[in-house]
């Protein structure tokens, strides 16, 4: 099992060679405009355009909590749009993050990373606007990715 590599820096500028997947959490209502997605959109237009189309056409595709959309942005980098947030606001149903959906997304991500021999790069997913706890997210990453000997890099900006 490989340990998680914690780095200071920008997750949109992955610090590793080879094929890379940048993973982040999306909501299930088609919203894109706050948090880490702003940095993604500033660097590449493709992840936002793909996510918006995926949501718009959700009656004809797999868009739902737990789904993952991989979007190529360069020859060696893909962005994983992972739907693991119910709505955008904390309310009577608690925080927006859905840990079971995070686990499902990470399992799918592990299969994709293994198949493409990619390292995985991310901010502290689910812990910003989604309201999640790193104490709950980190073990999900370890179980899904690190335990499969996938190189994982978590960036603190």
Image (cartoon, helix red, strand yellow):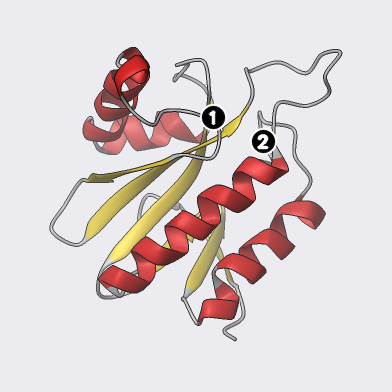
In the displayed orientation, state which residue is furthest to the left.
Answer: 75
Badge 2: residue crowd in 10 Å (few <14, some 14–19, many ≥20): some
- Residue 132: which quarter of the image? top right
Decide: few, some or many residues near mark 1? Use Cα within 10 Å; few <14, some 14-19, many ≥20.
few
* Closest to the observer, 58 or 24: 58
Q: Is residue 157 visible?
A: no
In front of the other: 122 or 82: 82
Residue 71 placed where, x, y %? 26, 43
Q: Nearer the viewer, residue 123 or 27?
A: 27
Q: Which mark is residue 128?
A: 2
124 in relation to 37, above or below? below
Position of the N terminus, as image quadrant, is: bottom right
Q: Residue furthest front?
A: 60
The answer to whether marks 1 and 2 mark residues whose Cβ atoms lie closer than 8 Å is yes
Q: Find residue 14 and report its horizontal and vertical position in percent.
A: 37, 61
- The percent coordinates of residue 120 (x first, y second) are 43, 64
**Residue located 78% across and 18% down the image:** 90
């Amino acid at each position: 099992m490989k340990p998680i590599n914690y780095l200071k820096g920008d997750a949109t500028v992955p610090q590793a060679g080879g094929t890379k997947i940048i993973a982040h959490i999306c909501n299930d209502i088609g919203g894109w405009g706050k948090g880490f997605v702003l940095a993604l959109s500033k660097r590449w237009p493709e992840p936002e355009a793909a996510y918006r189309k995926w949501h718009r056409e959700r009656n004809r595709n797999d868009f739902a909590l737990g789904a993952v959309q991989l979007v190529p942005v360069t020859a060696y980098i893909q962005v994983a749009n992972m739907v693991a947030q119910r709505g955008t606001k904390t309310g009577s149903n608690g925080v927006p993050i859905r840990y079971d959906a995070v686990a499902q997304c990470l399992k799918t991500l592990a299969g994709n990373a293994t198949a493409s021999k990619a390292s995985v790069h991310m901010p502290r997913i689910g812990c910003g606007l989604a309201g999640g706890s790193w104490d709950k997210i980190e073990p999900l990453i370890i179980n899904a990715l690190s335990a499969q000997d996938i190189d994982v890099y978590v960036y603190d900006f």
